[in-house]
Amino acid sequence: GTGLVITQNGTTGRDARYTISAGWSTFAVNSPAMVATASGETITFVSDAPGTIVDIWTYDTTKTMTVTIDGVAKTSITGTPTSTLKKFSYTGLANTTHTVAITTTVAGQQHFVVGVDVHSGDGLSVSNLGVAGSNVSQWAAGTYYLLAEPIRKLAPALTFIQCQVNDA
């Protein structure tokens, strides 16, 4: 599978598997989420690895978004006001790569997408959850790494942490 592919990682670029319409923006500095407040804004993810399950991660306060997988409409994502990270799973898919389109439906309300994961439910899953552009002082405050919640929800059996100095 693809592992969880977050919509953005704190840089101006993003993973090439995403196509994002102009109405989406970064939710907060170094947040993994994108946010849109207009109706009809779409995030499209094209997997490069096969899987029978598509997981879409969002904040639970999101407003209703439609989901299509390989051009087929699926159950919409509808949040509830709990302010937690939530995973919406779509199972029973063909074991192939998938195109996932997530579209906002409510004007003037916040819609959030954290990331997409295409997998088969077994075997090794590798997620690259790096954050670019941070300072030691931001990490020392203890609240900087907004991916901590997704990592806890993923409950990995093994984690590698790489800290790297960039003096460019």
Image (cartoon, rainbow, N blue to C red):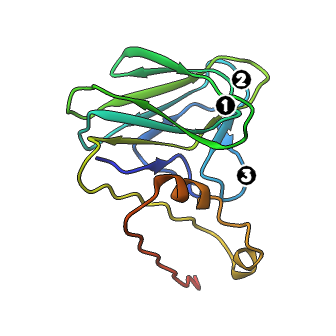
Q: Nearer the viewer, residue 121 or 95?
A: 121
**Which numbered disc covers residue 23?**
1
From mark 3 to mark 2, how far is it between C-alphas? 18 Å
Residue 63 visible in the displayed image: yes
Labelled pair 1, 3 in contact (Cβ < 8 Å): no
Rendered location of residue 164, percent (x, y) = 51, 82
Furthest residue in direction left, as rendered: 95
Q: Residue, x 55% and y 53% (percent of image)?
A: 150
For the residue labelled by badge 1, is the local secondary structure a helix, a strand or a loop? loop
Q: Residue, x 56% and y 57% (percent of image)?
A: 9
Identify residue type, mark 3: Ala
Q: Residue, x 70% and y 46% (percent of image)?
A: 27
Residue 116 falls in which quadrant of the image?
top left
Labelled pair 2, 1 in contact (Cβ < 8 Å): yes
Which numbered disc, 1 or 3, marks the residue closer to the eye? 3
Q: Badge 2 local density, few (<14 within 10 Å), some, or many (20+)?
A: some
Residue 136 falls in which quadrant of the image?
bottom right
Identify residue type, mark 1: Gly
Mark 3 or mark 2: whose residue is earlier in sequence? 3
Identify residue type, mark 2: Ala
Q: Residue, x 31% and y 55% (percent of image)?
A: 125
Mark 1 or mark 3: whose residue is earlier in sequence? 1
Q: Nearer the viewer, residue 141 or 14?
A: 141
Q: Which residue is mark 3?
A: 28
From mark 1 to mark 3, how far is it between C-alphas? 15 Å
